[in-house]
């Protein structure tokens, strides 16, 4: 299914971290589709390099340099900069169908079934349910649609100042035309709704497939979320979310655990990886596999010197269930982070 892809967007290094976790989650849940990320000018070289290890395609979108209709539209509506970058996903015409996902979403299971839906499928926006939310949507790349969207943008702007306004105006029959284009709320479960409609979360929350971190503070904005001991370091403040965090699945912590196990080791900082200088994505997925296995089997760690261990690791002979097990690596990472 290389003709289809999940697509996300990273405008800067913060959102790039979100994109990395999203990409890793889609891979861990064994998607059969390609992964593509659109990046803006502000994404640094180290982040680009990590993205290229996770995604099949890293597509730089430099709207102002593009010299095409997008540039002209952008000059007329400079306030819609990020929106133009996002609309660029319609120009990925080497794919027949795509699912766009915001970089601030967390995927909890395989969601390839979304590709059975047609353009434009999306979930209702909790704030105004006759509008769709543009955090997750199914679309069909097309030069024609792309240029119509750019024109619509240029002529009418956006009623909410962003891509959601533009797309809801363009696909204006979404609310009434075809119920099959309404994605269930479980594909865009807002972390906020857990708290605002708790009975519904108790009833449906178990089937959540995608968590969308709304609001200004994103998972990557927390310093580091403690795990084993159940303490939440972000909870030094008295926020509502913090006080109740122990009662609900901690999706922020889940995000961090993916970030630490599968993204941090790919980052080039020397201290980011305790054992190997050039870890590959394959190695990382083995880490995750080893962690899963470790839940079932617990073997005593063999006594090897640190130098021997490093050598064995570099020869590809890692002791995934013992000394090199995921929990040991994680503990090491934690000690670096603290
Ligand atoms: C990164 O980009 C996002 C989305 O475009 C924006 O909301 C955010 O403020 C940016 N963050 C930084 C640190 O520039
Ligand atoms: C999806 O993302 C955020 C969460 O509320 C929001 O703005 C939007 O309304 C959500 N749509 C849903 C949950 O369908
Ligand atoms: Mn979002």
Image (tube, rainbow, N blue to C red):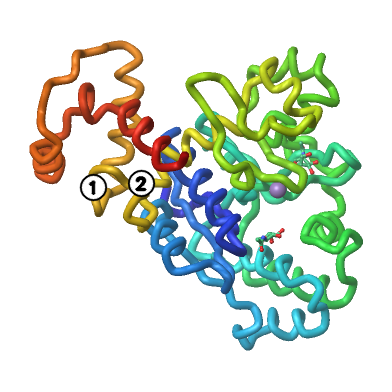
Q: Is residue 101 above or below residue 81?
A: above
Circle 1 residues within 10 Å: few <14, some 14–19, many ≥20? some
Identify the residue at the far bottom of this view.
67
- Indicate the position of residue 40 as horizontal and vertical percent values: 58, 69
Q: Secondary structure at mark 1?
A: loop
Q: Nearer the viewer, residue 194 or 330?
A: 330
Task: Measure the alpha-carbon separation of dots 2 and 1.
Answer: 9 Å
What label sits on residue 265 in the rendered view? 2
Q: Dot 1 corresponds to which residue?
A: 276
Quick one: 191 or 164, which is closer to the camera?
A: 191
Q: Which mark is residue 48?
A: none
Q: Residue at x 83, y 55 (%)?
A: 168
Q: Are marks 2 and 1 in contact (CB under 8 Å)?
A: yes
Q: Position of residue 102 (x, y in %)?
A: 64, 49
Tell me which image quadrant ligand 1 sits in.
bottom right
The quadrant where residue 337 appears: top left
Q: Position of residue 123 (x, y in %)?
A: 75, 39
Relative to residue 256, is residue 181 drawn left or right? right
- Asked if one can make out residue 300 in the rendered structure from this viewpoint, the answer is yes
Q: Earlier in the sequence, mark 2 or mark 1?
A: 2
Q: Which residue is depicted at the point 55% across and 60% down?
A: 13
Nearer to us in this view, 231 or 249: 231
The answer to whether residue 101 shows anywhere in this view is: no
* Corner quadrant of residue 213: top right
Circle 2 packing at 10 Å, graded few (<14), some (14-19), many (20+), is many
Q: Position of residue 263 (x, y in %)?
A: 42, 46
What secondary structure is marked by label 2? Answer: helix
| Residue displayed at 81% across by 18% down | 198
Q: Is residue 227 above or below residue 172?
A: above
């Amino acid at each position: 299914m290389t003709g289809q892809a999940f697509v996300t967007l990273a405008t800067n290094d913060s959102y790039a971290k979100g994109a990395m976790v999203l990409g890793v989650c889609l891979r861990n849940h064994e998607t059969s589709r390609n992964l593509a990320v659109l990046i803006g000018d502000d994404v640094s070289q180290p982040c680009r390099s990590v993205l290229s290890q996770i995604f099949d395609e890293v597509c730089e979108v430099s709207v102002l340099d593009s010299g095409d209709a997008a540039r002209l539209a952008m000059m007329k509506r400079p306030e819609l900069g990020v929106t133009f970058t996002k609309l660029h996903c319609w120009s990925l015409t080497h794919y027949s169908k795509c699912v766009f996902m915001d970089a601030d979403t967390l995927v909890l299971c395989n969601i390839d079934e979304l590709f059975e839906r047609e353009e434009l499928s999306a979930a209702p926006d909790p704030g105004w349910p006759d509008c769709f939310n543009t955090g997750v949507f199914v679309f069909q790349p097309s030069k024609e649609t792309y240029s119509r969207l750019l024109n619509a943008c240029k002529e009418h702007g956006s009623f909410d100042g962003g891509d959601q306004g533009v797309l809801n105006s363009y696909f204006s029959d979404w609310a009434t035309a075809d119920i099959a284009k309404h994605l269930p709320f479980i594909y865009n479960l807002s972390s906020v709704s857990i708290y605002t409609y708790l009975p519904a979360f108790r009833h449906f929350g178990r089937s959540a497939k995608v968590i969308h971190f709304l609001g200004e503070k994103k998972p990557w904005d927390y310093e580091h979320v403690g795990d084993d001991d159940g303490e939440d370091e972000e909870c030094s403040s008295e926020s509502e979310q913090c006080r109740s965090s122990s009662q609900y699945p901690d999706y922020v912590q889940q995000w961090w655990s993916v970030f630490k196990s599968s993204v941090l080791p790919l980052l080039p900082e020397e201290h980011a990886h305790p054992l190997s200088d050039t870890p590959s994505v394959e190695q990382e997925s083995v880490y995750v596999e080893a962690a899963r296995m470790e839940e079932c089997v617990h073997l005593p760690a063999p006594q090897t010197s640190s130098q021997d261990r490093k050598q064995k690791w570099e020869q590809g002979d890692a002791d995934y269930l013992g000394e090199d097990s995921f929990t040991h690596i994680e503990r090491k990472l934690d000690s670096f982070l603290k």
